[in-house]
Amino acid sequence: MASEQVVKQYLAYWFQLGKKVIIGGSGKALIPQSIMQGGVYSQEFEKCWQLITSPEARDSHLEGTPETISELLTDPWQVMPCARCTMPVPMLNVGIPSLTCPCNDLSNWPNSELPAPRSPVNSQAGLIGICDRVENRTWGS
Ligand SMILES: [Zn+2]
């Protein structure tokens, strides 16, 4: 099954491309204004996550996809990169990809000229790693 961290990242990536989440029960479409803040998920994103994973909204799903978020957090679902655009998409453990990547109805995606969506923790760590390496090289020479 996909871990909470992975499903969060899946949502964060698609939010960055403007996909909304349809809240179960109310049918309301929701997208946080800010997704990241200082290297972590924003409070707004966390609130949105709480709502999506609450028992009243267990049918919440990403716009344009049939899989619900609570479904992804159970066996036998995994999140894998889409073959077309490398964005995270739900996939069954047995290796059958979901027929509908949310990128299906994005006419401007994949687009190598747009910054690729990222997750807060990794990008921050990556950046620090690069800075360290550059500094070490400078001081070492
Ligand atoms: Zn795709």
Image: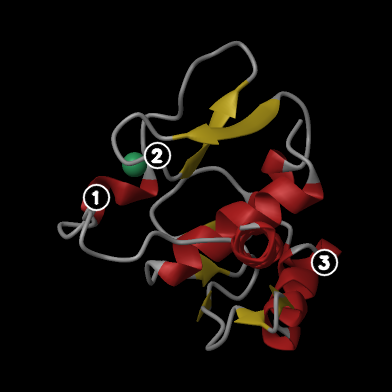
Q: Amino acid at mark 3?
A: Ser
Q: Is residue 5 left or right of residue 116?
A: right
Whether tag 1 and tag 2 are in contact, CB under 8 A, the answer is: yes
Say which of 3 and 29 sits in front. 3
Q: CA distance from mark 3 to mark 1?
A: 32 Å
Q: Residue furthest left?
A: 107
Disc assigned to residue 54:
3
- Label 2, on which residue? 86
- Label 1, on which residue? 110
Determine if the C-beta at disc 1 is less than 8 A from ligand 1. yes
Q: Residue furthest top?
A: 94
Taking the spot 63% from the left edge, 56% from the top edge, the residue there is 9
Q: CA distance from mark 2 to mark 3?
A: 29 Å
Earlier in the chain: of badge 2 and badge 3, it is 3
Determine if the C-beta at disc 2 is less than 8 A from ligand 1. yes
Taking the spot 47% from the left edge, 35% from the top edge, the residue there is 81
